[in-house]
Image (cartoon, rainbow, N blue to C red):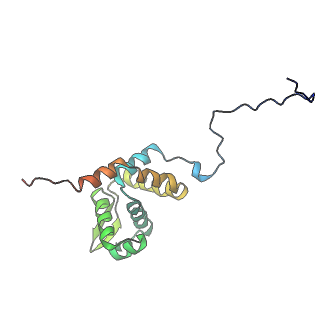
Amino acid sequence: MIVACGHPEPRPQAISLQQPPSNGTKMDEPVSLPLRAFLLDHIDSVAQLEALLLLRREAKPLPLGAIARALYVPEATAAEELAALGVRGLLAVEDEAWRYAPSTPETAAMVDELAATYARALIPVTNIVHGNPLRLRRFADAFRFRKDK
């Protein structure tokens, strides 16, 4: 098409509906489906996630107070978070000190994957934790009245 000044009108650029190519950053790497399922089943909060990874990294028992300080939470909150991880087969307590204690080799491998993924994709991992519908259900269930038998 020719416009009034005699020059051809530029053709509009085609719009691509495909995703732009990755820029190669670590944040582009997705969370695997098995890891996503693990997070949904085992982790209710970022404090739990941080506690689990702290004890894995330290590879020695730590007292409750030290863990609470590292997480910047009150000791009562840390105790609740650690107890939940203990029930789920991720931690153990001995002589008032908590340690990393995965219940199976598969669980240990999943926590290893979690540590690696969290190091390179913190926001996607925390988004999964914050959006966990099971976390919300467990929280609501804590307020349910139950009949004593």
Among all residues in the image, which is located at the extreme right?
6
Q: Residue at x 34, y 59 (%)?
A: 90
> Horizontal and vertical percent for residue 58?
43, 69
Nearest the viewer among 57 and 18 is: 18
Q: Residue at x 39, y 55 (%)?
A: 108
Among all residues in the image, which is located at the extreme left?
149
Q: Residue at x 34, y 62 (%)?
A: 101
> Horizontal and vertical percent for residue 33?
45, 43
Side of 18 where 59 appears, left or right:
left
Does 48 appear above or below 76? above
Q: Residue at x 75, y 32 (%)?
A: 13
- Residue 69 sits in which quadrant? bottom left
- Residue 2 sits in which quadrant? top right
Pick the quarter of the image with the N terminus. top right
> Horizontal and vertical percent for residue 72?
41, 72
Side of 117 where 67 appears, left or right:
left
Nearest the viewer among 103 and 78 is: 78
> Horizontal and vertical percent for residue 36?
43, 47
